[in-house]
Amino acid sequence: MKRFVIVIFLLLILVQCTISQTPIEPKPAQSQFTLINETADADNEEESPADTVFVIGDINGDNITDTAFIDPPLVIYDSLMYEREYIVTITFSCNVPALVIENSIGGFVLDITDLDDDGKDEIIYVYEWLSSCWGHFEVQSYSNNRWYKLADAGVYWCDEVGYASRVNKISKDKFEIIEDAMGDDAIMKQKKRVVKIRK
């Protein structure tokens, strides 16, 4: 009887060992960085065209209202497949080179007035962010067949934000930008600064 119990016990162990073994395939070697063109949040529904198309002013001086199109971000992964960087490309309906924004998961584009009297409107790009109410925006200008970042500013975007009213022309080579900042007393304040236009 003891032999019968020992044989049954050994058979159970043998069956359990063969069931639980699954072959492990080695991962192929990867380079340090991998470029993968996918949306930043592929699990969510696709963005509607209204989220990525923005009617803006005349950015190339041809007296025709232009349109900006924000492509889904390019995601750069490191060798461990962690997301390292996001790059957003904005293309335009007119014959203007694309505007490339680094370290952004997405955003939106707004038209502002012609700040430097060159006959072309400047634009604001507002960064989306993953969490919290703090973000920033930047003022971009197209001139001499390229884009120039004129300024950027921090903003507390959980409050109502009028981005276009935060950029005010002073003269053809200066403008004022209004940004949000946390003061020493932990109270949010707005501060104004004058920016000289350099291209």
Image: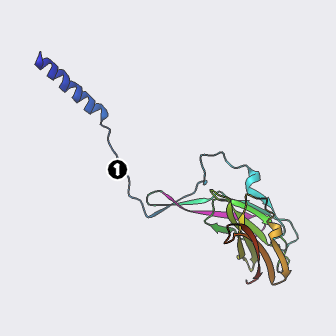
Q: Which residues are magenta?
A: 82-96
Q: Nearer the viewer, residue 79 or 7?
A: 7
173 relative to 126, above or below: below
Is 96 above or below relative to 194?
A: above
Colour basis: rainbow
- Helix or strand or loop: what does disc 1 sit on? loop
Is 79 placed left or right of 140 in the picture? left
Indicate yes or no whether the magenta region holds residue 86.
yes
Q: Position of residue 139 (x, y in %)?
A: 74, 72
Q: Which residue is pictured at 14% across the width and 18% down the height?
A: 4
- Report the predominant secondary structure element of the magenta stretch: strand
Direction top: furthest residue: 1
Could you say which quadrant of the image residue 13 lies in? Answer: top left
Q: Tell which of 193 and 107 is nearer to you.
A: 193
Residue 191 sits above or below residue 197 on the image: above
- The front one of 152 and 182 is 182
Q: Quadrant of residue 170?
A: bottom right
Q: Residue at x 83, y 68 (%)?
A: 165
How many discs appear?
A: 1
In which quadrant of the rendered image does the C terminus lie? bottom right
Q: Which residue is mark 1?
A: 26
Residue 21 screen position, x and y as percent: 29, 37
Q: Residue, x 76% and y 57% (percent of image)?
A: 53
Q: Quadrant of the N terminus?
A: top left
Task: Please say whether residue 177 is one of the residues in the magenta stretch.
Answer: no
Report whether residue 117 is seen.
no
Q: Amino acid at mark 1?
A: Pro
| Residue 81 picture location, percent across and down | 47, 56
Residue 14 in sight in this render: yes
**Residue 126 screen position, x and y as percent:** 72, 64
Which residue is depicted at the point 60% across and 65% down? 103
